[in-house]
Image (cartoon, rainbow, N blue to C red):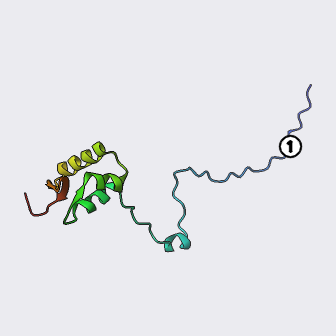
Amino acid sequence: MTDTNEAAVVTKPVTKRPRRMARDPMIATADRLAAPVPTKRASKSDLVLGLLQRPEGATIDQLVAATGWLPHTTRAALTGLRKKGHSVTSEKVEGQRHYRIVYGAS
């Protein structure tokens, strides 16, 4: 026979902390609510648009220097702007091709 003394075993109630998943939103505190909302960083495409909107436009060399892209990538970005509906024009001035965005022209 085995001695089973079940009455002598005292069990404590187990309390578990609630689980938090990594994707659970943080609880908002007053400090977080008062913090300024970060603004969106300007992308390289926004930089290209800004350069092309200047009255004199921009050359491929200027766009490459500003973005760090290779020339063929810069030309592809110009094609992408055309596909998005921007009217990108080019003209040769003093032996260099200048690209501009012209508004009002269709």
Residue 100 horizontal/vertical position (percent): 18, 58
The front one of 83 and 55 is 55
| Local SS, label 1 | loop
Asked if residue 81 lies left or right of residue 64, the reply is left
Asked if residue 61 lies left or right of residue 22, the reply is left
Q: Quadrant of the N terminus?
A: top right
The front one of 56 and 34 is 56
Q: Residue at x 92, y 31 (%)?
A: 3
The front one of 58 and 28 is 58
Residue lying furthest front:
94
Residue lying furthest left:
106
Q: Are there few (<14), some (14-19), or many (20+) residues within 10 Å of tag 1?
A: few
| Residue for badge 1 | 9
The front one of 60 and 36 is 60
Asked if residue 76 lies left or right of residue 38, the reply is left
Residue 43 horizontal/vertical position (percent): 35, 57
Asked if residue 15 lies left or right of residue 12, the reply is left
Q: How many marks?
A: 1
Q: Quadrant of residue 98?
A: bottom left
Q: Residue at x 21, y 47 (%)?
A: 79
Residue 69 horizontal/vertical position (percent): 35, 48
Residue 55 horizontal/vertical position (percent): 19, 66
Q: Residue at x 62, y 53 (%)?
A: 18
